[in-house]
Amino acid sequence: MNTENANAVVLVERFYEDMELWYPLFRLKEEKASVSIVGPEKGVTYNSKHGYPATSDEAADDVDVQQLDAVIIPGGYAPDHMRRTPGMVELVRNAWEQGSVVAFICHGGWIAVSADILHDKRATSFYAIRDDMVNAGANWVDAEVVQDGNLVSARKPDDLPAFSRTILELLREK
């Protein structure tokens, strides 16, 4: 797949980690992918941990998962809020089941836990949620980026270059 034909969403909720939302979003846009920000509700502005605003283009319940090639899940405290919205969790689960790239960084793994997609998958995360990941069935690895099939995971903002590069490589392979 040429990334110009790729459709991706980046999930948002309050208290997201700034760089973990914006860096992959801009990298995908640089590669001419179609990217939108998806939250629990459309048109709502969610502030990051540091107060930077991101406004959702779509609500999770309104996303046509059949059209998605990738779902990116930033960390921060946002994943704890995202997992409280069934539509956000279902979006991730449905994207996973259809073979879309599902990528999370830092605490974004909490959504993968709630979506129940980690069984026997190699993955990483911020070390503080390692136990959650393992208890959900992941084979947790402490590495900059871990790819297992269409699952991509990373630990922290320092890992964003490798994280974004891996997502783009997978999209090109599709």
Image (cartoon, rainbow, N blue to C red):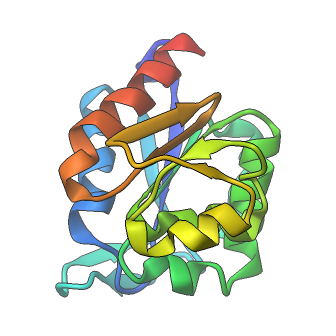
Q: Residue at x 64, y 28 (%)?
A: 149
Determine whether, in the image, residue 167 is placed left or right of residue 150.
Answer: left
In the rendered view, tell whether residue 42 sits above or below residue 58: below
In the rendered view, tell whether residue 2 sits above or below residue 114: above
**Quarter of the view holding residue 135:** bottom right
Q: Residue at x 44, y 80 (%)?
A: 78
**Visible in this render: residue 127?**
yes
**Quarter of the view holding residue 28:** top left
Determine whether, in the image, residue 97 is placed left or right of residue 161.
Answer: right
Determine whether, in the image, residue 41 is placed left or right of residue 93.
Answer: left
Task: Give whichever of 83, 63 is nearer the camera.
Answer: 83
The N terminus: image quadrant: top right
Query: Residue 41, image x and y in percent?
Result: 58, 80
Task: Give whichever of 164, 147 is nearer the camera.
Answer: 147
Q: Residue at x 77, y 39 (%)?
A: 66
- The count of marks equals 0
**Visible in this render: residue 28?**
no
Query: Residue 30, image x and y in percent?
Result: 24, 31
Query: Residue 142, image x and y in percent?
Result: 40, 49
Query: Residue 114, image x and y in percent?
Result: 72, 71
**Quarter of the view holding residue 161:** top left
Q: Residue at x 80, y 37 (%)?
A: 98
Determine whether, in the image, residue 18 is placed left or right of residue 76.
Answer: left
The C terminus: image quadrant: top right
